[in-house]
Image: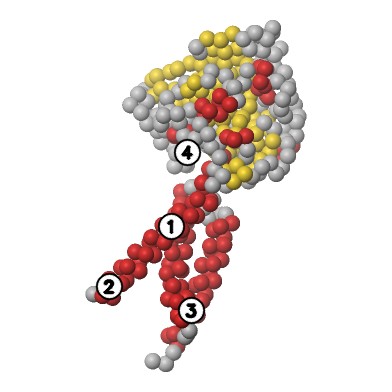
Amino acid sequence: MKKPFRIFFALLPHITLILSLMLLTFFVIDLFNESMAFLNNTITKYLVGILSLLTVILSVFSVLRDQRPR
Amino acid sequence: MKRTGRLVLYFTVDLILLGIFLCVFALFHHVLPRRIGNLYGSSVTTGEADWSAKFPDKFTSDGSVVKNDNFYMDSHSNITLTTHAENGVTYYVADVYVRDITTLRTAMAGDVFATGVTDTTLNLSRKNNAVFSVSGDYFGVRQRGIVIRNGEVFRKTKAHQICVLYYDGTMETYSYTSFDVEQAIAGGAWQAWDFGPVLLDENGKAITEFNTGIAGENPRIGIGYYEPGHYCFVAVDGRQSHSRGMTLLEMASLFESLGCRRAYNLDGGQSAVMTWQGEIFSSPAVPGGRKISDIIFIAPATNSQGDDP
């Protein structure tokens, strides 16, 4: 695998982890104060989109790695 | 051991990045001023009335001003302030008569409808030359919530229970589900606040159950309605040695005992401030009170006539 890909796949779990924790934080805040719209705003919608995309890539990568002959 | 150390380092870096990202998000979502402007134009002007004949002894007929430490009267407004201390709570009641509804006004920080733009109640009061003012519903801290101010419609998305003051002087309170913003606009909404909760039922009796996280003892601001042209405002000191603050149940009982037909809770806590003749009258939980988005105020007759809407 080329170096940029290696870096990307090394960083991928960390980015996914950070985004997930951010959204969990917004979720908890939203439970207490819905009207501040931490979940229902444009920035968060983009974050959800990015997280979903990264999760798909991470999952596919993980499945492919598991299927690789040892 | 080396592997464990590397894992700890990775997670530490992840947590630091998480903190940085949260701060950047909060900066854009919450702190940086974002001017929204008026997207919806004016409410329907209907049912405006002059209550000078209804309350003939409440206004001066020659344009003069009568005032002392607790009383103010001019040709358009009559305000009596009383201070009460009972059961470990200090609160202030402003009994307000207005000649027409445009005397009871609101003002926004920076004169713009925006999030992230705030000022103290006292500064907003002085900028608007208010005789009397209280802090409003702090609409700028939320992305949702009905905002109609001085007949202009700024935001139509509901967030909580809603209070509407109409051009005809009536004040109505609504549950989240029963409120229809288009109906309120067509009915001549002069002001609308979205904070709550509603404190009295349709018979003027105190509501006895509140399903909210702010029901405990707190500094508070509330608006009450007797009849068109006659209103009251209550400010409660709290979180201090001289005053513990009021629960919503106590606040509701107070408005019932005052004889109000409708009553509504506005933003309290550190926001709760009442000003009188250019000075802070209540005792806010923090010096000067929190910077907020808006105030409700009564201006001298010369300020309140003919400039708006």
Q: Position of residue B188 (x, y in %)?
A: 72, 32
Residue A44 pos. (x, y %)? 54, 58
Q: Nearer the viewer, residue B98 or A46?
A: A46
Question: From mark 2 to mark 1, how far is it between C-alphas?
Answer: 24 Å
Query: Which chain hosts label 4?
Result: B
**Residue B14 seen by the camera:** yes
Spatial separation of the CA atoms under disc 3 and disc 2 = 26 Å
Q: Give the residue displayed 75% in from the left and 31% down from the top.
A: B45
| Distance (Cα) linking label 3 and label 4 | 57 Å
Q: For the residues carrying marks 2 and 4, which lies nearer the camera in this image?
A: 2
- Residue drawn at point x = 61 percent, y = 29 percent: B106
**Kind of element beneath mark 4:** loop
Label 2: chain letter = B
In front of the other: B126 or B222: B126
Whole-angstrom CA distance, mark 2 to mark 4, is 50 Å
Disc 1 target residue: B20
Q: Amino acid under label 1?
A: Ile
